[in-house]
């Protein structure tokens, strides 16, 4: 079982190879919580995260070593399970800095990154309050769902009285590779997803497109990143009645190999100029990969790290399923640029964006420190 350090220059869970499972939780601070409450919460979250990511129980006495007369420090369901590659990544939403009513609850308004604003409305958005916005986020990823759920459960327990879950999402089946050592996984449309992702091994691209630079401002974000979460419902039943050729044209790649429709194998560069015998472009004008490609977006690239989700079915018997899209980028502008290009995406007939959130992910903490320390 793999183990990742919680401490480091950058938070883990971004360029670390994506795990199989996700529990993503968004919290709102309690009414009346003070700046000291927020600082103590981040300190206690960091201390617990540092232990859990090493496969240890929360607190010195853990689940069973404490007083019989007190609730245990750890909830216990991960006893005996390895760290399972657990990473815990903490982010700050726009409302932590300025509340919806404009109040500066934590004295942070002056430190707010200029671009940390709720994402603009995009065409086709059908956002639900139960999957949108929030003060703080925790992304817990692990190869074992019980380990990811244990992490969120214990961090929520620590937050009791200071912050409470606003919404959360469980994900399975990573939909992206973030390292060249990983085989490309598939999303619920059955296509390989993550072929043209920013990969950890591309260190120059990671510095250029993912980490906030020391001159980008604000200073406390240097070495951090911005996390976009989009809950995207897939209209699975319509997709499943669609011809294979149409499916491939929608994406711009073939379904088996994941090769571009302009030819070659999975990792062959897409030739957007290639034409069919009919004279039509081999990769259609409204194909997802054409519109999302950096060439169509002023060079903007994203590190995608999403997961599939299935939350049972709706009242009409359709699967309530889709992609819980997560991307990391140096600036929210990168996501906004790509998402705006996707307004004419052929994929839009088969998907609906139902949730949206943006978080500033501060840099990693030094050993013994805490995430968010640079902000206070
Ligand atoms: C590429 C599926 C939403 C950005 C791809 C690929 C697939 C795919 C199959 C090709 C393989 C690859 O290169 O990874 C989907 C599905 C979505 C979705 C099913 C919704 C349910 C999004 C969103 C964004 C996005 C919301 C960003 C706003 C990208 C980018 C690429 C890509 C940047 C790489 C394009 C390239 O450089 O060739 N997507 N995607 N996708 N997608 Fe998506």
Image (tube, rainbow, N blue to C red):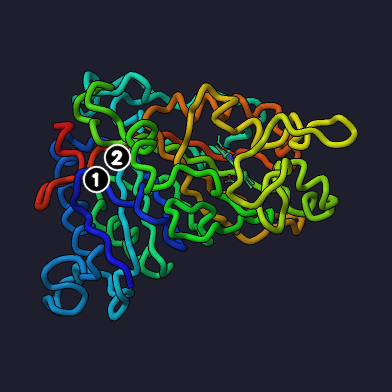
Height in image: 364 above or below 70?
above
Q: Going by the image, does 160 lie left or right of 287?
A: left
Residue on which disc 2 sits: 29
Question: Which mark is on residue 117?
Answer: none
Q: Residues within 10 Å of mark 2 (few under 14, many from 20)?
A: many
The residue depicted at 42 percent of the width and 53 percent of the height is 179
Q: Going by the image, does 172 lie left or right of 296?
A: left
Asked if the beta carbon under badge 2 is closer than 8 A to the nearest atom of ligand 1, the reply is no
Helix, strand or loop at disc 1? loop
Question: Real-space Cα distance between discs 1 and 2?
Answer: 6 Å
**1 and 2 marks in contact (CB < 8 Å):** yes
The residue depicted at 52 percent of the width and 61 percent of the height is 183
Residue on which disc 1 sits: 162
Q: Provide residue 241's location: percent of width, then percent of height.
A: 84, 53
Q: Nearer the viewer, residue 20 or 375?
A: 20
Q: Quadrant of residue 317?
A: bottom right
Q: Going by the image, does 19 lie left or right of 348?
A: left
Q: Provide residue 40's location: percent of width, then percent of height.
A: 14, 45
Height in image: 59 above or below 192?
below
Q: Nearer the viewer, residue 39 or 300?
A: 300
Image mark count:
2
Q: Residues within 10 Å of mark 1 (few under 14, many from 20)?
A: some
The quadrant in which the N terminus is found is bottom left
Split into quadrants, the picture shows ligand 1 in the one at top right
Mark with earlier residue (1, 2): 2
Height in image: 350 above or below 108?
below
């Amino acid at each position: 079982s793999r183990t990742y350090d919680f401490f480091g220059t950058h938070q883990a869970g971004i360029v670390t190879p994506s795990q199989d499972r996700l529990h993503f939780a968004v919290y709102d601070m309690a009414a009346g919580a003070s700046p000291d409450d927020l600082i103590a919460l981040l300190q206690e979250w960091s201390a617990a995260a540092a232990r859990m990511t090493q496969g240890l129980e929360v607190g010195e006495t853990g689940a069973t070593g404490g007083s019989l007369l007190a609730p245990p420090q750890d909830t216990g369901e991960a006893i005996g399970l390895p760290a399972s590659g657990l990473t815990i990544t903490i982010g700050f939403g726009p409302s932590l800095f300025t509340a919806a009513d404009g109040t500066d609850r934590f004295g942070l308004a002056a430190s707010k990154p200029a671009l940390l604003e709720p994402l603009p409305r995009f065409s086709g958005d059908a956002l639900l309050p139960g999957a949108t916005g929030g003060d703080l986020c925790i992304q817990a990823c692990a190869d074992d769902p019980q380990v990811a759920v244990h992490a969120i459960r214990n961090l929520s327990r620590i937050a009791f009285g200071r912050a409470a879950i606003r919404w959360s999402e469980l994900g399975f089946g990573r939909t992206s590779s973030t390292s060249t050592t990983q085989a490309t996984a598939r999303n619920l449309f059955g296509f390989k997803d993550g072929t043209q992702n920013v990969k950890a091994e591309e260190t120059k691209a990671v510095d250029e497109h993912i980490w906030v630079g020391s001159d980008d401002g604000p200073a406390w974000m240097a070495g951090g990143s911005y996390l976009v979460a989009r809950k995207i419902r897939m209209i699975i039943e319509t997709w499943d009645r669609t011809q294979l050729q149409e499916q491939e044209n929608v994406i711009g790649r073939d379904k088996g190999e994941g090769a571009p429709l302009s030819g070659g194998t999975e990792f062959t560069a897409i030739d957007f100029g290639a034409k069919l015998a009919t004279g039509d472009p081999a990769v259609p004008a409204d194909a997802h990969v054409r519109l999302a490609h950096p060439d169509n977006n002023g060079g903007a690239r994203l590190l995608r790290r999403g997961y599939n989700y299935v939350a049972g079915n709706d009242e009409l018997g359709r699967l309530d399923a889709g992609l819980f899209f997560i991307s990391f980028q140096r600036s929210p502008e990168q996501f906004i640029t790509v998402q705006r290009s996707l307004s004419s995406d052929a994929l839009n007939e088969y998907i609906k964006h139902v949730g949206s959130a943006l978080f500033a992910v501060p840099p990693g903490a030094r050993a013994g420190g805490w995430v968010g320390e640079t902000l206070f």
